[in-house]
């Protein structure tokens, strides 16, 4: 056994934060793990699922985060420890269940790991989920190191059982995806037995696992939170470093603790600035904080995204006896730190320096300028685009042509997946709305009912195959039911490609590699009573014609399935391209009238390269996957494909 | 009036969006950007070229009538009612099969068929109607295919797109049968042959059709679809004045629409057209007022004259003189179109010196405005 499942207590492994969290869950003896993939959370489940069979527990990629949350809760109800992991958007999907779950309490330890994505490196929105913990009265821990990521996760299960409520771990991209040493603990070896015990210990006639009577349960929850606060007062995940009397006290947690530590060190202020590092984020250990507040009259809150600690600690201060001197707070409210985006040590240095009236130059300005310029002199300029041979490029080519030919200013309402790149040149700027999973079809429902207001623009909603199962089905049903006029295009590439090719209900294989029923989306759509067409996006002519026909129709929704396997999946399996592609330079018109570099300027497959010296297009054989679609794009027949 | 050749962006703003596009097809089919679809020229993607053949050959961008006339006839543009003519005749086919499906006298199909038979051409760019009477241009390479094109439905059709789509290494010698605006664009192509497209020098015979206006292939087709069972229609006709009707024939019936009801589908661009008789063709062909089953034929070039002579000799065509009153009527109608168009052009430009797209000698302008 390797990776997160390695049975070597006391040894040190180099783990990314997500692996450390997974290891913590294994050391806690989980029996069930469930998740829907989403950056930066995906590797938690990916590493768990890779050892599930060998370690004799159950893991699944669920259809969406709400179901994933419910799957884990189900296991907990029957006495099996369970973890569910998701990105911040996923918690929104699971929110309704979560908000009810907190009322009832749990069975065995139940932990929700939510990975926030400050600066939205791979997200559609920026959101600080610590607020959800506060809102729903959920005990929340936030690791600052990889060791803590493992240890906290393990402890969260004990905590959940002790408090009889779900516990949350908040991670961020720089914890999730950075790598560090983790000292391993024991892996439990005992057999687990599941049994659902439904008798409520308080009112035997009531079921144990319901969120009713809510008001009474809510008061119970507050008591659980009080207990958590008590436990957190002495938690080893909270500590202070620095002088007894500090000129400045930094209160921080998570990845920001490391930034703060580094900043203080760089400024050589270890003797003047103290750092209170918090690992138990909600409920806050009130007494511990009050104790340290007295250390300085200047308090700086270093945290990412929302002023969560800042607001919550100010609430504590408001409750202090009137005579207590009020410190000056620095942070997001004061404008010293942005209430959005990631932080880094440089930013924290700047803030500390400005509060302490210091000047600090991390490196000479001239050097900085050079360092920032250098990458751009060596890196080839590249736009964010679909992979070479990606079926989505062909799909959006057909969509673009169909909408232009139709001529009524039609547009695409978008969704979350690789195809979100269609907001830019990769998809010829066709996608004009983009929110959350399933919103493409949902928003199309509203637009498709505006005929009475003179609205005549064709609405074309897109979603991926995994997204279709995740959240687009209710929107489609709504459209059928309410006769909304739109075309739903399902980009079926037989994988959850963007997050790393996880299987989904349509693929016929489970996360653990078991063969299963492939949910037939075509048959499903048929059964809903909607007209379905299936196209191969590489057949550009037929795809365009099919789309044109679909968008020309009136009445309720139509479905067009663009079916073509993700090129990366195909390439890995087949190990060879379907075609060998080359450009006949004698036929290539290049920039001349009649072409104007259509293939390299508009179609934009990275396998096509413009050779400015010869004034011709060429194929980059190292990148070209041999899909051969560009042959059908070239107006001169200059791109030649030969079957391999 | 801007004499400069520009690109597709300007073609869009100055011609297509400005309502001057005749749907001749000269801009379409030669590149991946401009295509004809359901009665419109569509720009699929932006082209960055500041000068394009799309703009250059458009019959509604700057057109030097003298230069074109010099190219075709060796003389400056006369501005006469019927343009440069050698002879104006009346003809009809002797071929019963052609006559059966002919709009009038079957002259065009007969001449093309003869030219093909004699090895003068290898094919012809023609227009045919689908079952649902959507017109489309195609390359006819046999007498049978040529017969498919007989008859008209009066809708504009981008004939030159089909020409632009021919392989550039094609050696086929061609005839083109087209409307005045299309022949004007074709003349611009022959004046400065296209780059990286079919060899326009292979066009050996240009047959022009008379045209007072063309109907929108989108709007009018919709109208037809709403009012007729289109696959059953065998022929459309606009009989010469004073009938003032549009007729659709089915095997059992003849349905008439008042011409005024049809006129609302006339392409707006036709209002600015000065040419009724396809003045830059080798031969121009139309109906004869008051004499059913015959065509008026204007022979303009030696090529045209030779072909008519051959058809006469081989007994393919019956040839007669056109009565002076018919000729007078034809000239009157043609002149009226010129005068109206010139007025429309000046009204639109607001300047007698600015004729939007056409460059004419001042004496011709004065004559037409008199």
Image (spheres, rainbow, N blue to C red):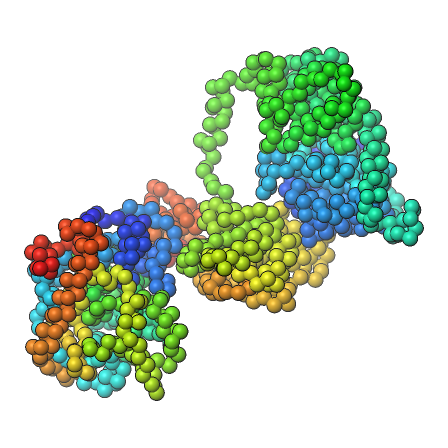
Residue at 8%, 56% (x, y): give it: B366
Front residue (pair B133, B161): B133
Q: Is residue A437 above or below residue B264?
A: above
Does the rendering let one see residue A212? yes
Residue B46 place in picture, x, y as percent:
37, 49
Does the rendering let one see residue A18? no
Residue at 54%, 58% (x, y): give it: A449
Q: Is residue A615 left or right of residue A294?
A: left
Q: Is residue B366 left or right of residue A136?
A: left
| Quadrant position of residue B19 | bottom left
Q: Is residue B16 left or right of residue A220?
A: left
Residue A276 place in picture, x, y as percent:
73, 22
Q: How many marks?
A: 0
Residue at 21%, 85% (x, y): give it: B95
| Quarter that holds the N terminus of chain A | top right
Front residue (pair B211, A397): B211
Residue A418 place in picture, x, y as percent:
56, 48
Front residue (pair A601, A406): A406
Q: Is residue A312 above or below residue B225?
A: above
Residue A153 place in picture, x, y as percent:
77, 37
| Quadrant position of residue A400 | bottom left
| Quadrant position of residue A476 | bottom right
Residue at 65%, 53% (x, y): give it: A470
């Amino acid at each position: 056994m390797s990776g997160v499942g390695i049975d070597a207590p006391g040894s040190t492994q180099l783990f990314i934060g997500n692996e450390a969290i997974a290891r913590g869950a294994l050391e806690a003896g989980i029996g069930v793990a469930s998740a829907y993939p989403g950056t930066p959370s995906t590797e938690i489940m990916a590493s768990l699922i890779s050892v599930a069979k060998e370690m004799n527990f159950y893991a699944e990629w669920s259809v969406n985060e709400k179901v994933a949350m419910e799957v884990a809760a189900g296991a907990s109800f029957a006495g099996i420890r369970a973890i569910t992991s998701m990105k911040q958007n996923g918690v929104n999907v699971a929110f309704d269940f979560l908000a009810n779950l907190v009322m009832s309490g749990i069975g065995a330890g139940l932990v929700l790991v939510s990975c926030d994505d400050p600066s939205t490196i791979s997200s559609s929105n920026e959101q600080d989920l610590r607020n959800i913990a506060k809102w729903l009265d959920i005990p929340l821990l936030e690791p600052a190191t990889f060791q803590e990521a493992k240890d906290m996760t393990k402890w969260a299960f004990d905590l959940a059982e002790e408090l009889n409520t779900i516990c949350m771990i908040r991670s961020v991209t720089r914890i999730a995806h950075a790598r560090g040493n983790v000292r391993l603990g024991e892996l439990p070896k005992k057999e687990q037995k599941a049994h659902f015990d439904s008798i409520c210990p308080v009112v035997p006639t009531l079921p144990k696992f319901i969120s009713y009577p809510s008001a009474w349960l809510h008061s119970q929850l507050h008591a659980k939170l009080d207990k958590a606060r008590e436990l957190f007062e002495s938690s080893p995940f909270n500590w202070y470093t620095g002088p007894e009397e500090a000129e400045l006290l930094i209160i921080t947690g998570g990845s920001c603790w490391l930034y703060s530590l580094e900043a203080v060190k760089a400024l050589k202020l270890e003797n003047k600035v103290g750092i209170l590092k918090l690992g138990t984020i909600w409920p806050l250990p009130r007494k511990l904080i009050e104790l340290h507040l007295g250390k300085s009259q200047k308090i700086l809150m270093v945290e990412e995204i929302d002023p969560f600690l800042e607001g919550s600690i100010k609430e504590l201060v408001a409750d202090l006896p009137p005579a207590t001197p009020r410190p000056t707070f620095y942070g997001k409210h004061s404008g010293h730190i942005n209430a959005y985006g990631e932080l880094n040590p440089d930013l924290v240095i700047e803030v500390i320096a400005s509060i302490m009236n210091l000047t600090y130059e991390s490196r000479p300005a001239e050097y900085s300028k050079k360092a920032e310029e250098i990458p751009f002199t060596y890196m080839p300029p590249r736009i964010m685009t679909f992979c070479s041979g990606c079926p989505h490029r062909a799909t959006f080519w057909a969509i673009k042509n169909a909408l232009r030919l139709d001529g009524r200013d039609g547009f695409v309402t978008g969704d979350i997946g690789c195809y979100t790149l269609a907001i830019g040149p990769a998809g010829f700027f066709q996608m004009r709305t983009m929110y959350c999973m399933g919103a493409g079809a949902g928003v199309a429902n509203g637009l498709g009912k505006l005929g009475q207001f003179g609205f005549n623009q064709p609405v074309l909603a897109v979603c991926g195959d995994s997204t279709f199962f995740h959240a687009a089905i209710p929107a489609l049903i709504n459209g059928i039911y309410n006769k909304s006029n739109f075309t739903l295009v399902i980009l079926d590439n037989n994988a959850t490609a963007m997050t790393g090719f996880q299987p989904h209900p349509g693929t016929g294989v489970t996360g653990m590699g078991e063969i299963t029923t492939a949910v037939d989306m075509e048959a499903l759509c048929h059964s809903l009573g909607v007209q379905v067409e299936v196209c191969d996006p590489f057949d550009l002519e037929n795809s365009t014609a099919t789309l044109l026909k679909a968008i020309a129709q009136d009445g309720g929704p139509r479905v067009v399935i663009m079916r073509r396997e993700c090129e990366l999946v195909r390439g890995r399996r087949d190990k060879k391209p379907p075609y060998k592609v080359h450009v006949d330079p004698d036929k290539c018109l290049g920039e001349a009238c009649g072409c104007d570099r259509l293939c390299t300027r508009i179609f934009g497959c990275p396998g096509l390269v413009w050779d400015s010296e010869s004034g011709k297009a060429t194929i980059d054989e190292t990148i070209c996957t041999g899909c051969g679609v560009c042959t059908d794009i070239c107006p001169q027949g200059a791109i030649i494909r030969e079957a391999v | 009036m801007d004499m400069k050749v520009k690109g597709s962006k300007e073609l869009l703003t100055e011609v297509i969006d400005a309502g001057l596009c005749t749907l001749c097809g000269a801009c379409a089919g030669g590149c991946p950007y401009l295509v004809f679809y359901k009665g419109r020229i569509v720009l699929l993607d932006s082209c960055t070229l500041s000068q394009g053949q799309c703009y250059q050959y458009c019959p509604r961008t700057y057109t030097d009538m003298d230069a074109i006339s010099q190219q075709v006839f060796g003389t400056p543009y006369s501005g006469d009612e019927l343009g440069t003519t050698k002879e104006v005749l009346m003809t009809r086919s002797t071929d019963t099969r052609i006559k059966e499906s002919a709009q009038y006298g079957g002259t065009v199909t007969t001449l093309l068929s003869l030219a093909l038979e004699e090895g003068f051409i290898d094919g012809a760019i023609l227009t045919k109607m689908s079952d649902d009477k959507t017109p489309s241009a195609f390359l006819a390479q046999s007498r049978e295919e040529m017969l498919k094109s007989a008859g008209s439905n009066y809708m504009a059709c981008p004939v030159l797109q089909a020409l632009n789509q021919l392989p550039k290494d094609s050696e086929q010698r061609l005839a083109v049968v087209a409307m005045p605006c299309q022949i004007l664009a074709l003349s611009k192509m022959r004046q400065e042959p296209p780059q990286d497209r079919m060899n326009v020098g292979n066009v050996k015979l240009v047959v022009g059709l008379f045209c007072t206006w063309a109907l929108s292939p989108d709007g009018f087709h919709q109208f037809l679809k709403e009012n007729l069972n289109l696959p059953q229609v065998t022929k459309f006709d606009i009989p010469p004045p004073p009938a003032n009707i549009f007729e659709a024939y089915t095997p059992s019936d003849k349905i008439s629409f008042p011409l005024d009801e049809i006129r609302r589908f006339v392409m707006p661009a036709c209002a600015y057209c000065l040419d009724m008789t396809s003045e830059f063709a080798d031969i121009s062909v139309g109906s004869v007022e008051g004499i059913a089953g015959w065509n008026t034929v204007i022979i303009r070039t030696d090529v045209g004259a030779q072909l008519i002579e051959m058809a006469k000799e081989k007994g393919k065509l019956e040839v007669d003189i056109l009565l002076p009153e018919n000729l007078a009527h034809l000239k009157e109608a043609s002149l009226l179109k010129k005068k109206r168009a010139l007025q429309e052009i000046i009204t639109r430009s607001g300047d007698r010196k600015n004729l939007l797209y056409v460059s004419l000698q001042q004496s011709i302008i004065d004559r037409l405005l008199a």
